[in-house]
Image: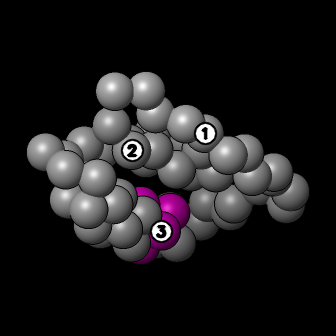
């Protein structure tokens, strides 16, 4: 599963990491388009966190 925590509900998945990241890019683009149409804004601040995925 891949998610963009800055955009609530922007979550996707893929069979591989590369596929999940490509799907997330598309999900972010669609979410931003919808948000712009509806007048939403992104949070003014956020922080990045490194994560490790255990196999």
Residue 33 lies, with reference to residue 49, above or below; the image says below
Label 1 to label 2: alpha-carbon separation: 12 Å
The residue at the point 52 percent across, 50 percent down is 4
User: Dividing the picture into quarters, in which one does residue 9 lie?
Assistant: top left
Report helix, strand or loop for mark 2: strand
Q: Magenta segment, which residues?
A: 31-35
User: Dividing the picture into quarters, in which one does residue 11 lie?
Assistant: top left
Q: Residues within 10 Å of mark 3 (few under 14, many from 20)?
A: some
N-term mark: 1 or 3: 3
Reply yes or no: does residue 30 show up in magenta.
no
Report helix, strand or loop for mark 1: loop
In the image shown, does 3 or 18 lie closer to the viewer? Answer: 18
Residue 54 lies, with reference to residue 50, above or below; the image says above
N-term mark: 2 or 3: 2
The residue at the point 33 percent across, 60 percent down is 21
Label 1 to label 3: alpha-carbon separation: 24 Å
Checking the image for residue 9, the label placed there is none
- Is residue 1 left or right of 6 when viewed as pictured? left
Q: Main secondary structure of the magenta part?
A: helix
Quadrant of image for the N terminus: top left
Q: Residue furthest top?
A: 54
The residue at the point 39 percent across, 44 percent down is 2
Residue 1 appears anywhere in the view: yes
Quadrant of image for the C terminus: top left
N-term mark: 1 or 2: 2
Reply yes or no: does residue 33 show up in magenta.
yes
- The percent position of residue 47, horizontal first and vertical second, equals 81, 51
Residue that carries the numbered disc 3 in the rendered image: 32
Checking the image for residue 2, the label placed there is 2
The residue at the point 25 percent across, 43 percent down is 13
Residue that carries the numbered disc 1 in the rendered image: 51
Residue 36 lies, with reference to residue 48, above or below; the image says below
């Amino acid at each position: 599963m891949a998610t963009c925590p800055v955009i609530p509900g922007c979550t996707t998945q893929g069979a591989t990491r590369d596929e999940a990241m490509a799907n997330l890019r598309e999900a972010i683009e669609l979410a931003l388009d919808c948000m712009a149409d509806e007048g939403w804004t992104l949070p003014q601040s956020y922080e990045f966190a490194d994560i490790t995925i255990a196999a």
